[in-house]
Amino acid sequence: MQAYHESFARVYNLRWGGWAKSIAPHLEKFFSAFSGISEQPTLLDLCCGTGQLALHFLQRGFRVTGIDLSAAMLRYARENCNEFLESGLAQFIHADATAFTLEEPVRFAISTYDALNHLADLEALKKCLQCVHQALMDEGVFIFDLNTRLGLRRWATLRIEEDPKLTLMQSGLWDEAGGKAWVRIWGFLRSEDGRYDRFEETVFNTAFHLADVSRVLRETGWHRWHFSRLDDLTTPLEDPEQEARVFVVAYKD
Ligand SMILES: C[S@@+](CC[C@H](N)C(=O)[O-])C[C@H]1O[C@@H](n2cnc3c(N)ncnc32)[C@H](O)[C@@H]1O
């Protein structure tokens, strides 16, 4: 379980929410190439965090369901997507990515910024892929990114950042035998009244061998998939383990 806590959710919203926003145009371009999405397209944003990616798609006419295990992250997601809540175009659900169902199937699903590396093991990834498979329409597509082993080895560093608003420290560990990277993130964030609030979060990423990811995709009924780079989601990578991060594009049918 890696639901982010309240104090960290506030920092995430300020400091990391922008990454999802920056990758959104690539995902949108990929989705727009599909025929039959002239009617209102539907999107599941799994592990949606603070909702910046959901907002991008809501503003472009998608109906979005966000799921996250952190009540604190969901509060920011609802705040960021506030204008779309009342109409029902946006809904945010508190649920585990390994055990959820949707009332209506969706056309597209995404899960970004290493969210699925937060799952504890292959069994959890398998359950998650099963849930997404069930949540999609037959012609549905799921795109998720993963830090590879190569990428996670780089977590073993100490970083300190400081600006007038935020002091941020990150210390990472990489466990080669266990295939897990850990990072402790802590620091101080200035409030509007000038005081500094302390935050702290420790998260892990599981390093999935991409051959194992392929195996669990096959076992959970996905029809075809490939590993790609964000800037070219249609082209399969020849040697994805040589990348620090890959985008998995999986087709239900
Ligand atoms: C790195 S953040 C990514 C957030 C967002 N997708 C983005 O691109 O900014 C990972 C998110 O996954 C959520 N999370 C972790 N484990 C989860 C689980 N088992 N089920 C649902 N959400 C989970 C955390 O609460 C957090 O919001």
Image: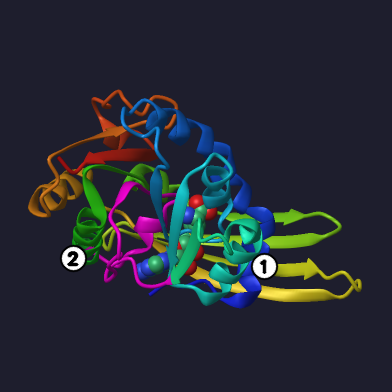
Q: Is residue 97 above or below residue 164?
A: below
Task: Check if residue 108 falls in the magenta segment.
Answer: yes
Q: Marks 1 and 2: CB-CB under 8 Å?
A: no
Numbered badge on residue 10: 1
Say which element carries label 1.
helix
In the rendered view, does 211 fall on the left or right side of 166? left
Nearer the observer, 155 or 8: 8
Our reading of the magenta stretch's main secondary structure is: loop
Alpha carbon distance from label 1 to label 2: 31 Å
Q: What label sits on residue 123 in the rendered view?
A: 2
Region of the chain picked out in magenta, as a range:
94-121
x 87%, y 75%: residue: 195
Residue 149 drawn above or below residue 82: above
Is residue 16 covered in magenta?
no
Which amino acid is tagged 1? Arg
Name the quarter where the N terminus is drawn.
Answer: bottom left
Name the residue furthest right.
Answer: 193
Tell me the quarter of the picture where residue 239 sits.
top left
Q: Where does residue 35 sit, x and y in percent of width and height?
A: 31, 27
- Residue in the image at 54% along x and 47% along y: 58
Residue 235: x percent and y percent? 30, 23
Question: In the drawing, does residue 198 fall left or right of residue 174?
Answer: right
Q: Dividing the image into four equal quarters, which quarter contains ligand 1?
A: bottom left
Q: What is the three-letter code of the residue carrying label 2?
A: Glu
Say if 128 sits above or below 198 in the image. Answer: above
